[in-house]
């Protein structure tokens, strides 16, 4: 019963007993890598947990500087790119080459939109002197009324702690954006290979495993968005 | 033979061991997509309501639900072997252990802000 289907599959390497085992091993290895990524981002998330509790007022004031429409749009953009990637994996599984290429291109497009919106947000922080360091300006937090904000004014020492929030904001979203850029680079390579038909004869492992990476980066953002943008948004009493 | 006969696979490349191999359909992906967008909207709305200490709990709860949905369906884990499911679970368990132990360290200090 096994012999009738005994064909040498082109991607099957000799040290694996079957192609199925090879594929499973690849998926397992990719998940192990993603676990290391969980630990990596996890350290930053822990720092966030600690400092948000220690300097809550500063975190509230700093978080309210972020734009919810831009952040929510970015969340929707990433979810859409994840959907396109998932459909791309399906296209590879059922061997629809042109659909696979289109879906990979769309995934890349939405990834680039995300990076573009991130650039707009970062630029605004640069303009307002909210990048931590020598040129950080706390006046918007000590005298919010002067800037037309309805925030509670912070004492100067607590206002300095907004730098901690912004440090974590840039570290976490910056590291996330770096992962997105690496992913976009890999996508370009996959698009070229898919266009040449590398994934149209049943060899879907690179597409599937890249999909795992892309969805993981999406999940990191799904946590970053509420934690950074939505700390305390109900109107002041 | 392959039970997905509507997808032509003459060399049985996808399923040489005749193991269960579920192909998630674009329709299922569309449901997941809609769910994710819906809960993104809910989390933004919930952030605008004062629920006291429950605001972060709800925000994290919704984010976790979205992550689980992405993991199970977009990343296919629901249809994978026990090895993969165990690996994913072990990863999140280890992360929780690291966070808990580090928190214990900070909370039990005589100095510091706690």
Image (cartoon, rainbow, N blue to C red):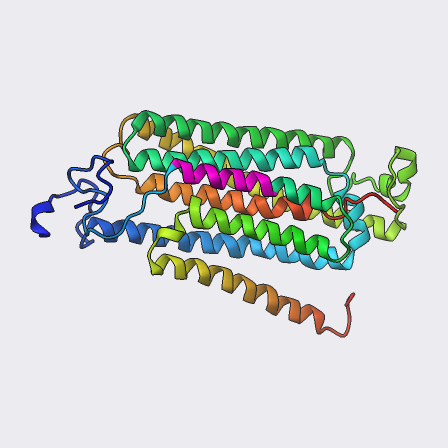
- Image point (50%, 60%), residue name: B92
**What is the span of residues highlighted in magenta in the rendered image?**
B26-39
Q: Position of residue B94 (x, y in %)?
A: 50, 64
Q: Give the quadrant of residue B56.
A: bottom right
**In which quadrant of the rendered view does residue A77 lie?**
top right
The part of the image, by quadrant, that contains residue A62 is: top right
Horizontally, is A51 left or right of A154 in the view?
left
- In the displayed structure, does residue B14 sit left or right of residue A64? left
Q: Position of residue A122 (x, y in %)?
A: 68, 34
**Of the pair A185 and A79, the residue shown nearer to us:** A79
Look at the magenta stretch and give its main secondary structure.
helix
Q: How many marks?
A: 0
Above or below: residue A212 compared with residue A105? below
In the image, B10: left or right of A172? Answer: left
Q: Identify the residue shown where x is 34% and y is 60%.
A: B83
Report whether residue A48 is seen. Answer: no
Residue at figure coordinates x 39%, y 25% from the top left:
A102
Does residue A46 show up? yes
Left or right of B112, for residue A145:
right
Q: Position of residue B84 (x, y in %)?
A: 37, 57
Give the vertical position of B3 relative to A117 (above or below).
below
Quadrant location of the C terminus of chain B in the rendered image: bottom right
Q: Is residue B12 magenta?
A: no
- Rendered residue at 22%/45% (across/down): B3
């Amino acid at each position: 019963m096994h012999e009738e289907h005994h064909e040498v599959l082109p991607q099957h390497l000799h040290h694996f007993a079957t192609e199925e085992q090879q594929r499973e091993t690849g998926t397992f290895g990719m998940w192990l890598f993603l676990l290391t990524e969980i630990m990596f981002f996890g350290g930053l998330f822990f720092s966030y947990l600690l400092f948000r509790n220690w300097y809550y007022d500063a975190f509230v004031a700093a978080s309210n500087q972020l734009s919810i429409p831009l952040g929510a749009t970015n969340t929707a953009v990433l979810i859409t790119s994840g959907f396109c990637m998932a459909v791309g994996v399906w296209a590879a599984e059922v061997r629809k080459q042109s659909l696979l290429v289109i879906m990979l291109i769309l995934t890349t497009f939405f990834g680039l939109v995300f990076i573009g919106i991130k650039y707009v947000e970062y630029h605004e922080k640069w303009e307002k002197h909210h990048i931590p360091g020598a040129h950080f300006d706390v006046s918007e937090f000590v005298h919010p009324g002067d800037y037309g904000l309805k925030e509670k004014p912070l004492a100067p020492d607590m206002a300095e702690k907004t730098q901690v929030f912004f440090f974590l904001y840039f570290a976490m979203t910056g590291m996330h954006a770096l992962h997105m850029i690496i992913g976009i680079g890999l996508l370009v390579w996959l698009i070229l290979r898919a266009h040449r038909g590398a994934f149209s004869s049943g060899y879907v492992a690179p597409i599937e495993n890249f999909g795992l990476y892309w969805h993981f980066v999406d999940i990191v953002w799904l946590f970053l968005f509420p934690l950074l943008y939505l700390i305390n948004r109900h109107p002041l009493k | 033979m392959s039970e997905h006969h509507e997808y032509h696979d003459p060399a049985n490349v996808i399923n040489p061991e005749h193991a269960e191999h579920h192909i998630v359909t674009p329709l299922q992906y569309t449901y997941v997509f809609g769910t994710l967008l819906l809960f993104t909207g809910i989390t933004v709305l919930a952030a605008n309501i004062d629920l006291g200490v429950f605001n972060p709990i709800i925000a994290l709860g919704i984010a976790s639900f979205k992550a689980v949905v992405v993991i199970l369906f977009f990343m296919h884990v629901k249809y994978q072997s026990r090895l993969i499911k165990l690996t994913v679970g072990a990863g999140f368990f280890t992360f929780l252990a690291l966070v808990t132990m580090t928190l214990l360290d900070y909370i039990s200090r005589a100095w510091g802000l706690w």
